[in-house]
Amino acid sequence: QVQLVESGGGLVQPGGSLSLSCAASGFTFSSSWMYWLRQAPGKGLEWVSTVSDRGGLTYYADSVKGRFTISRDNAKNTLYMRMNSLKPEDTALYYCARSPNGLGRGQGTQVTVSS
């Protein structure tokens, strides 16, 4: 069955960096566009970033553009998100998904940005 497992979250100070990973299985990862989404406490699910199946196209929400970088390794069936210059407003549960609305997303990994 389709499985997405996020990891790499944690507590970081404002201005710090984190790298998230998403291990995918149960589907043809290399043929799938992939997405990162997040949900902050008390708020709805927010699209963060998209990467095309071969990694040649990437898209970002304005709120993270220039600070976050999405990438993938199709040989390892793994999706990544490098997050730099983190802000308190980036605090959220981060999910990877096969659809931009988050359907079928994984369990998520918590990112907390606080001093």
Image (spheres, rainbow, N blue to C red):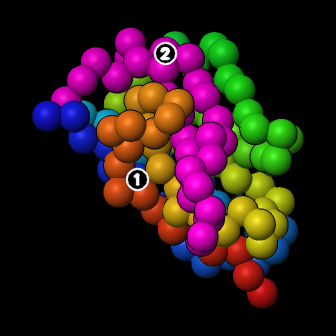
Judged left or right of residue 35, residue 87 is right
Tell me, yes or no, if residue 81 can be seen here: no
Residue at the image point whose x is 41% and y is 18% from the top: 32
Whether residue 41 appears in magenta in the rendering, the answer is yes
Residue at the image point whose x is 73% and y is 34% from the top: 60
Residue 56 in percent (x, y) is at 63, 14
Tell me, yes or no, if residue 85 can be seen here: yes
The 10 Å Cα crowd at callout 2, few under 14, some 14 to 19, many 20 or more, is: some
Position above or below: 95 against 16: above
Which residue is disc 1 drawn over?
6
Of 95 and 12, the residue lying toward us: 95
Which residue is disc 2 drawn over?
53
Judged left or right of residue 44, residue 114 is right
Residue 82 in percent (x, y) is at 65, 48
Q: Residue furthest left?
A: 1
Nearest to N terminus: mark 1 or mark 2? 1
The span picked out in magenta is 26-53
